[in-house]
Image (cartoon, grey):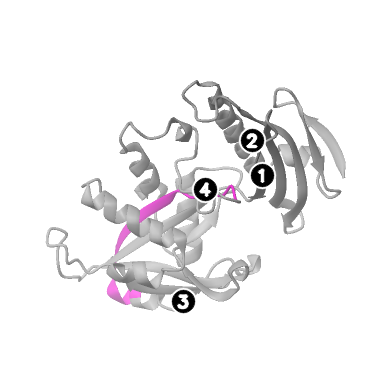
Amino acid sequence: MSTFNLVQTSPPIPVRLPPNLSQEQLLSFPAFRSWLSTLQESLQLQQEPSHPLHEAPYKLRSIEVQSCDYFGGQRLGFIKLKAEVTNDRGESLPGAVFMRGGSVAMLLILQPEDATGSSSSGDQEEYAVLVVQPRIAAGSLGFVEIPAGMLDDGGTFAGVAAREIKEETGLEIAADELVDMTALTIQSRNSDQSSDEAHLQQALYPSPGGCDEFIPIFLARKKIKRDEMNEMKGRLTGLRDHGEKITLKICRLAELWKVGVRDGKTLAAVALYEGLKREKKL
């Protein structure tokens, strides 16, 4: 293990690294920079007298990076670290973090061009696109979920979402055609939302007890020929040379909440879509 002092904090705190990770690699890792900035802003809020932790504020004392994984042997992918966050009373907060950074997810709704029904009657013939793929972390070789992908070092959330739709489904959808349902919902909330949330990402956090991952969920609608939609069913897609073994699945939109019940982001997409429609924001 090697150690350096993190000068981005005041006072500087010690950071311990495993042998296969350098200081430069850690400090240039977007997920680490985003996490550290967000945590520092949260800790700063304790200075407000109204903050519930104001009387005994917590401080970040040290960070120990326990392990890391690389994509393709070169690009830093995941980090497991332990942050020591304590107050002057000797009380501590859980600090184990699996760090992977942000992702995007897409609710892709298809409507056959010859479909009957209307939006005003509420009985439109609409379908959702799902992907079935191995998810070893879940112990599954056929996990059902809406299309999703990790954020890279550049580009916009919408741009990444559009690229993932192309890679996973073969459909071309421009970034400016996507609706960020998570941001739209957060912006429409009442002003009584917690001030401690203001600096968080405009995204959902699927497992904040131990993971930094955040996911904005986008909506895309597309009219399509029925034959073309039927040809999508069971199609093998994904970046095969990156280990993606994806099979497309099409289900009625009204059944999505049941078909994708094991996937948190799928259920979140259903809730956001139905809530925004109910409030006439879509």
Disc 3 versus disc 4: nearer the observer: 4
Q: Residues within 10 Å of mark 1 (few under 14, many from 20)?
A: some
What is the secondary structure assignment of the residue under circle 4? loop
The residue tagged 1 is 95
Q: Tell me which amino acid carries mark 3.
A: Arg
Q: CA distance from mark 1 to mark 3?
A: 42 Å
Q: Residue furthest left?
A: 121
> Magenta stretch containing residue 148, yes or no?
no
The residue tagged 3 is 235
The residue tagged 2 is 36
Query: Left or right: where does residue 218 sit relative to residue 126?
Result: right
Q: Residues within 10 Å of mark 4 (few under 14, many from 20)?
A: many
> Magenta stretch containing residue 217, yes or no?
yes
Disc 1 versus disc 4: nearer the observer: 1
Q: CA distance from mark 1 to mark 4?
A: 18 Å
What is the secondary structure assignment of the residue under circle 2? helix
Report x, y in % for residue 214.
52, 48
Are the residues tagged 1 and 2 within 8 Å (C-beta)?
Answer: no
Report x, y in % for residue 277.
24, 52
Taking depth in this image into account, of 154 and 5 the one nearest to the observer is 5
The vertical placement of 72 against 79, above or below, is below
Disc 1 versus disc 3: nearer the observer: 1
Q: CA distance from mark 2 to mark 4?
A: 14 Å
The stretch of residues the image draws in magenta is 211-229
